[in-house]
Image (spheres, rainbow, N blue to C red):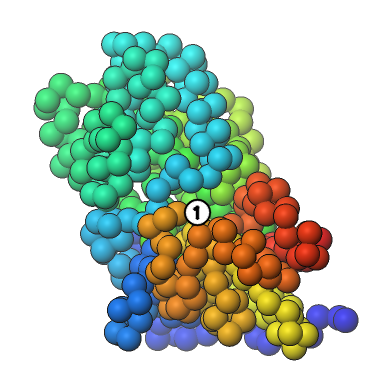
């Protein structure tokens, strides 16, 4: 069936609507990339008692700055609100843990890290990454503001500062003689409300000759892969290499290398050094990816123009599929109560009428309910017990791992529904 024509996109439709000042350069935001409606903080899983109470919802409107092309949300949710009791423990995906171990081993070798070095990880979670340095006898320090998660790190022997990172903490650690030879941050940059203070802090804490490595989902992959579900209240900013270079340069850091990674639907790992440290020349890869982004229009309105229409088309197709299952009397459950699933469910308005429960490995979420849509979260065993006809795989970036783990649903003719980049049934 041909696609029906898409009505005039609402982009920039409301001249009264402004996104406030850009988080990096301060220019007024006028250009909307997509409007995902009102959405609750995606990690606020509710207890049964909380279901009858009011729940905060905030606009999930994505803006792009016409000056520096930083894609961003306004920060309605305070960092304290998100991170003090953070429900996510990184250690729960096997593929992710394997990725981190390989990364640690590569970094140790590439930078010649030994027992005299200090590795600092910002947003260190439960120590899932630093442990691979610690087992080699390399001194480590985690920085993790979520108290429950930091406690888990301390239990496994990873010293952890339970604070938000910025220039204040960096100044204090430096004054104590603790400078980072390797300073890492995995999937933390998006969650920083005060981006300038954070990147300035990296420059302060980095030892002369040291290296910063930061991983973040690549904006180009988000746009090309229609990954609108990776947009949520806790992710304030979305980065191209082009804009990241500008932000780091403003704080005396030069990106000298970059890796393209498969993680989180396509990420960049950038390597930064002090701008005056000329011992590490800027590689061709940095120039190549920057040029590619410029060709694709990420430093102009061009790259962002059709995103909203594609997002709405995906919502329509996903709901059509779910309505068909409902009409046929087929039972649908979901797998993976990660943040990205919460945006998808809330934006599409999918509640327990269409999806009975969400199965997840994280015991913290069991017996709780998804924010906004109030679908219950159960342990993975519930899938074998209830034998659903369809499993909606919310963390589509881990679909191979998940479809292998849940391969047993084929015994009763169960099928998988992968929502992104386009809804697809996998038998
Ligand atoms: Zn800007």
What is the x, y in percent for residue 91?
Answer: 45, 42
Residue furthest to the right: 1
Judge by depth and name the residue closer to the eye, 256 or 340.
340
Residue furthest to the front: 385
What is the x, y in percent for residue 95?
Answer: 58, 40
What residue appears at the point 43 percent right and 45 percent down from the top-left corner?
A: 90
Q: Is mark 1 within 8 Å of ligand 1?
A: no
Q: Quadrant of residue 22?
A: bottom left
Left or right of residue 413: residue 213: left
Q: Is residue 331 above or below residue 74?
A: below
What residue appears at the point 78 percent right and 59 percent down from the top-left corner?
A: 410
What residue appears at the point 51 percent right and 69 percent down from the top-left corner?
A: 343
User: Element at badge 1?
Assistant: loop
The answer to whether residue 175 is seen in the rendering is: yes
Screen quadrant of the C terminus: bottom right
Screen quadrant of the N terminus: bottom right
Q: Is residue 237 above or below residue 326?
A: above
Left or right of residue 9: residue 110: left
The answer to whether residue 422 is seen in the rendering is: no
Judge by depth and name the residue closer to the eye, 34 or 246.
34
Residue at image mark 1: 361
Judge by depth and name the residue closer to the eye, 310 or 361.
361
- Number of other residues with Cα within 10 Å of mark 1, as a class: few under 14, some 14 to 19, many 20 or more: some
What is the x, y in percent for residue 151?
Answer: 25, 42
Q: Quadrant of residue 9?
A: bottom right
């Amino acid at each position: 069936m041909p696609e029906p024509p898409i009505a005039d996109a609402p982009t920039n439709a409301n001249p009264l609507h402004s996104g406030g000042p850009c988080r990096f350069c301060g220019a007024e935001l006028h250009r909307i990339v997509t409007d995902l409606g009102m959405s609750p903080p995606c990690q606020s899983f509710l207890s049964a008692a909380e279901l009858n109470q009011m729940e905060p919802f905030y606009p999930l409107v994505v803006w792009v700055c016409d000056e520096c092309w930083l894609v961003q949300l306004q920060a309605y949710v305070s960092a304290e609100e998100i991170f003090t009791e953070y429900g996510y423990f990184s250690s729960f995906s096997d593929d992710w843990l394997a990725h981190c171990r390989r990364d640690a081993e590569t970094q140790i070798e590439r930078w010649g890290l030994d027992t005299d070095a200090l590795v600092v990880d910002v947003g260190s979670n439960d120590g899932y990454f630093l442990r691979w340095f610690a087992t080699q006898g390399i001194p480590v320090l985690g920085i993790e503001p979520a108290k429950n998660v930091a406690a888990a790190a301390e239990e496994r022997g990873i010293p952890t500062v339970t604070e938000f990172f910025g220039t204040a903490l960096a100044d204090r650690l430096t004054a104590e003689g603790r400078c980072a030879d390797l300073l890492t941050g995995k999937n933390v940059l998006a969650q920083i409300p005060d981006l300038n203070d954070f990147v300035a802090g990296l420059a302060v804490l980095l030892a002369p000759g040291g290296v910063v490595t930061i991983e973040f989902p690549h904006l180009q992959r988000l746009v090309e892969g229609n990954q609108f579900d990776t947009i949520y209240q806790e992710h304030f900013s979305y980065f191209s290499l082009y804009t990241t270079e500008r932000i780091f340069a403003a704080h005396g850091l030069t990106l000298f290398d970059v890796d393209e990674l498969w993680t989180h639907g396509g990420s960049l790992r950038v390597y930064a050094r002090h701008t005056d440290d000329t011992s590490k020349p800027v590689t061709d890869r940095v120039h190549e990816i920057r040029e590619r982004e410029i060709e694709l229009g990420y430093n102009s309105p061009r790259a962002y123009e059709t995103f909203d229409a594609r997002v709405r088309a995906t919502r329509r197709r996903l709901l059509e599929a779910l309505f068909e299952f409902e009409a046929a009397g087929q039972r649908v459950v979901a797998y993976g109560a990660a943040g990205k699933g919460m945006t998808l469910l809330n934006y599409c308005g999918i509640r327990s009428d269409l999806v009975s429960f969400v199965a997840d490995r994280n015991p913290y979420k069991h017996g709780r309910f998804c924010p906004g849509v109030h679908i219950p979260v159960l342990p993975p065993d519930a899938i074998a017990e209830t034998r659903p006809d369809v499993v909606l795989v919310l963390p589509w970036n881990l679909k191979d791992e998940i479809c292998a783990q849940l391969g047993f649903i084929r015994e009763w003719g169960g099928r998988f529904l992968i929502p992104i980049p386009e809804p697809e049934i996998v038998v």
